Image (cartoon, rainbow, N blue to C red):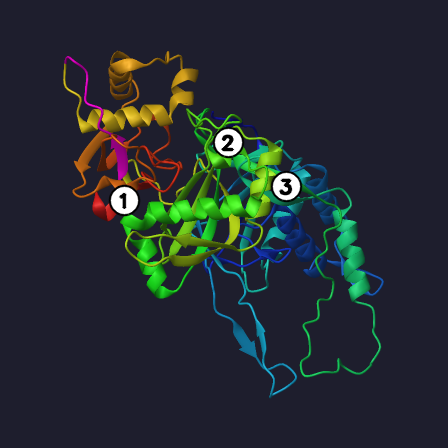
Amino acid sequence: MTTDVGPTLRIIVAFPQGLYSGAELGRAEELPSPARVHEAFTAAAAGGPTATVKGRVLVARDDHRLAIEWLEDNEPVAIIPPRVKMARRHARRFRWRASPVSLADTDFEPKCAVDGPIVFLWPEAPEEIVRALAEIAPEVTHLGRADSVVIARVDAVPGEPDRPETLRVAPGRGPGSVMRVAARGRLEELERAHGQASKAGSHGTGPLGKQAPDQHVTGGNQSEVVLRRFAPSIAPLGWPFAEVWELSVDARASDAAVLAERGNRVAAAVGIHRALIAAIGSDVPSFVTGRGTSGEPLRDGGHLAVHVTEVEEGDGLVALLGLPTEIGAAERERLAGAVARPLRARCRVPRGRDHWFSLGPATQRAAMPFWRAPSPILRTDVPLVLEATGGPRRGRWTLEDAVTCSVGYAMRAILEQAGFEWGAGWAFRRRMVESLREDRNVVVRVQRVRGAASQFVHRVCAGDLVVAVDADVELGNLAHAGSGFLALGRARHLGGGLLRPLPPTSR
């Protein structure tokens, strides 16, 4: 669904170094929140050449105060982010502080690479508000940490349609990013904290002990802010997944090499799935177990998807948990509690030793869009498995037909909402494949994988015949080009058939 944006106040923040550095409540941020923008403009107005004196401190002049308070009274409506990549550092840093003998170890500052500016959109503002904020913008020097240098610009723009990457304020729980937004009184709270920190202190002795601890002047000031969820505004209704939780994979080099092999990805996903069930304990949600209240397997989606794949544009592996669209808040919280602490999982390899690995904290991302480098062509990261059940009595049934049919089953909700009548049997499958190709412009190219297909699927019943294939898939008008989290085939919920955008060099 495309949303038409009316006249807006636009604040553009560019990063000359291509890096953003910030952390919220001890957790690294990929994007600065609108509250950070408000704080940066407050600091620029109260610390720049136009500031005025109030007691022992500088404060913003009256017209600049009115402009900043306008940002509090009118919440932002959208954010247009660039592509980002968070640097994951596992090393520790040791520094001499007060003692040349005992070293203190600390984390490295978080760094996130950004490939362009971040655009924040507020509702239409009066001309004098735009003018005042435009005067403050050149004095904004950084966002987040002091080494996160920025160049800010403010203007008013007419309405235009949302882009695929646009994030809009959304009610309730769900995919997207939860960010802080300044509320009424935030400016006064920041001034109060600054005045308190600027008071003259006593000249006492320093802290005793081997090391001098870090001193935070004002601490994490969370007063007069509210939380808002920003979610993608353009996404096809009925997409099988609402959000994806990304967890880092930490393993010894020998174990990581085993996990990286395509033939072991399903086994790794099964190990993660079992670790999640063990961490949840009793009353495991049905979308996690994959079975209904009576023990019958869930059909037509609704499953948690677990995949292990390579980090985008980097080295290492990550675990991806795809959450289906329709799950309750209580069920989601039970899963969140299971991944709130590090998970230990085991990958069982046939005729080999068990390989153990750990999962880091989860980063919640939207399932549409998901991939940071989209492409119109998607390729299976791990082969997808199809049931070799023969074909119709009349006519041919190729592997391309079977994979196209798998696309249809994965996109059932989208097809039904568009009026496609669901059914069963070979006549229905042929009709669906024909509709996907002619009406949806779905294109599939398939290559059969030589070797045992059993390594790419968790469980095969006695007498079942399966085949593994690699596939290139173009979803046509089912979705934006290569931007959504999706997997196909029989093992699509446990490690198999994950589709990733094809890099430009491989096309």
Label 3 sits on residue: 130
* 358 left or right, relative to 139: left
User: Residue 233 bears which disc, if any?
Assistant: 2
Q: Earlier along the polypeptide chain: callout 2 or callout 3?
A: 3
Which residue is identified by label 1? Answer: 455
Who's the residue at 27% across and 40% down the image? 379
Sequence-wise, which precedes: disc 2 or disc 1?
Answer: 2
> In terms of depth relative to the viewer, which is nearer, 110 or 79?
110
Q: Horizontally, is 118 left or right of 318 in the view? A: right
Q: Which span is picked out in magenta?
A: 383-394
Question: Viewer-nearest of labels 2 and 3?
Answer: 2
Q: Secondary structure at mark 3?
A: helix
Q: Secondary structure at mark 2?
A: loop
Which mark identifies residue 138?
Answer: none
Around disc 3, counting alpha carbons within 10 Å, would you say few (fewer than 14), some (14 to 19), or many (20 or more)?
some
For label 1, the SS is helix
